[in-house]
Image: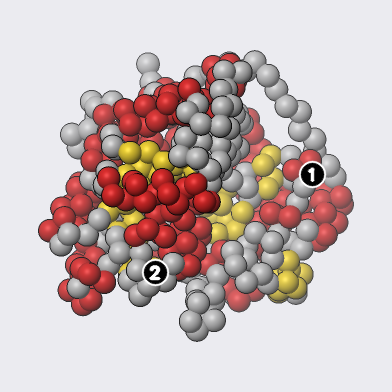
Amino acid sequence: MSRKYPAEPFRIKSIEYVKMNTREEREALMKEAGYNTFLLNSKDVYIDLLTDSGTNAMSDRQWAGIMMGDEAYAGSVNWHHLEATVKELFGFKYVVPTHQGRGAENLLSTMAIKPGQFVPGNMYFTTTRYHQEANGGIFKDIVIDEAHDSTIDLPFKGNVDLRKLQSIIDEHGADKIAYICVAVTVNLAGGQPVSMQNLRETYALCQQHGIKVFMDATRCIENAFFIKEREKGYENKTIKEIVLEEFSYSDGCTMSGKKDCLTNIGGFLCLNDEELFTQAKELVVVFEGMPSYGGMTGRDMEAMALGLKEAIEYEYIEHRIKQVRYLGDRLVEAGVPIVLPVGGHGVFLDARLFCPHIPQEQFPAQALAAQIYIESGVRSMERGIVSGGRDKVTGKDHAPKLETVRLTIPRRVYTYAHMDVVADAVIDLYKNRDKIKGLKWVYEPKQLRFFTGRFEQI
Ligand SMILES: *Cc1c(COP(=O)(O)O)cnc(C)c1O
């Protein structure tokens, strides 16, 4: 029997207490943190939906794996386990370990981008674009237009727009393109998936022109679930088969172990090209560590190998996606504006519609995230103009169309009852949204300003 919202496919063996403080305390704490939820202390947060990155709960098997860590400087047993697991599940020839996903992005961008080349991608991601630009690359958005509109409900809203890609090729020539970066799923569009057909067609077009495709594989298992659920011909395939097929339409990938690997740290780069692999092994030593640990401990690598095998199981991923959907469904029923459809890793509030009285220059999403914390102790994150940053050349704000607050659900950490607390708090605030005030900068960092920037209320 299948339930609309399946119960947790696990039982709880170890717990961590959380504390609720008072509204007065939270008001003072938020002011002290410069209205930036990144600057709050974890102990002051009741339900932490800041991110799904590195916040995963590990299984008893993974914890047992931690005890099996082989901390040898070179040739760790756990590295061989991780390498074999990634090769089996992703199907690439070579794997290079890194401390996080951005470590892999650094290696790839350094090797594969010549200054002045374009790097088209299905919407930008903060660290990904940073490394591309730091290596002289120019990011070009080739996601379908609908991805920038929160109200359009499409099954595969993360798809690459092949006409946009074709016109970049026509206008500049394939030589001017370093590679294409395809993210599965698209984080900043709301965790929106890419269809298998689109992956296949994107790869075919790139192959015609001799352009390489690298995937941002961070949420490749969540993407696979959507393909199984929504794409014709995949209903009866296993998640494992779908993941393998996803990667068959690429030349490699960068992976953040902190998301779909069900661990708290780690990452890796996958490649099929031997020459690039040789180069990556030389670079990884400088930035991360030996090619047999890349900034991870033996125990981390063991937990990651085991986590990947658990994440690719249907029962796990079905519950994961549907728990997120449960929160989204509750908000939609109450008329709260969210990005539709609900994606894989969180629910994104549309801050423009939520706070129509705050212009984008006064950071409506940043203000909304701060107010949600004050009202309820729930921590979320801005994904709008603050995260967008400034254009390297003009110095102007990127001003994305999507101005969102992300309620990101950590994997295997919270229950449906926690989702109800969050939904009730957001619905209540929506009814009293007039009281949310716009913000202005007090301190604006030059890079990735959303992490440490500070604001005050207008
Ligand atoms: C988290 C993330 C990254 C970067 O990974 P880290 O492990 O945080 O360095 C890259 N791309 C996407 C889409 C991500 O969500």
Q: Are marks 2 and 1 in contact (CB under 8 Å)?
A: no
Mark 2: C-beta under 8 Å from nearest atom of ligand 1: no
Discs 2/1, front = 2
Residue 331 or residue 140, whichever sits in front: 140
Residue 59 or residue 268, whichever sits in front: 268
Give the quarter of the figure containing the C terminus: bottom right
Up the image or down, 71 lies above or below 36; here it is above
Q: Secondary structure at mark 2?
A: loop
Label 2 and label 1: CA atoms lie apart by 40 Å
Q: Secondary structure at mark 1?
A: helix
Q: Position of residue 247 (x, y in %)?
A: 28, 41
Q: Residue at x 74, y 43 (%)?
A: 42
Q: Residue at x 16, y 55 (%)?
A: 207
Up the image or down, 453 lies above or below 398; here it is above
Q: Residue at x 36, y 64 (%)?
A: 113
Q: Is residue 149 rendered to the left or right of residue 332?
A: left
Name the residue beneath numbered marker 1: 44
Q: Earlier in the sequence, mark 2 or mark 1?
A: 1
Up the image or down, 344 lies above or below 300; here it is below
Tally of numbered discs: 2
Q: Position of residue 78 (x, y in %)?
A: 49, 25
Give the quarter of the figure containing the N terminus: top left
Residue at the far left in the pictured view: 208
Residue at the far bottom in the pictured view: 394
Q: Mark yes or no: residue 27 visible.
A: no
Amino acid marked by disc 2: Gly
Amino acid marked by disc 1: Asp
Q: Is residue 154 rendered to the left or right of residue 41?
A: left
Indicate which disc residue 137 carries: 2
Q: Residue at x 51, y 73 (%)?
A: 399
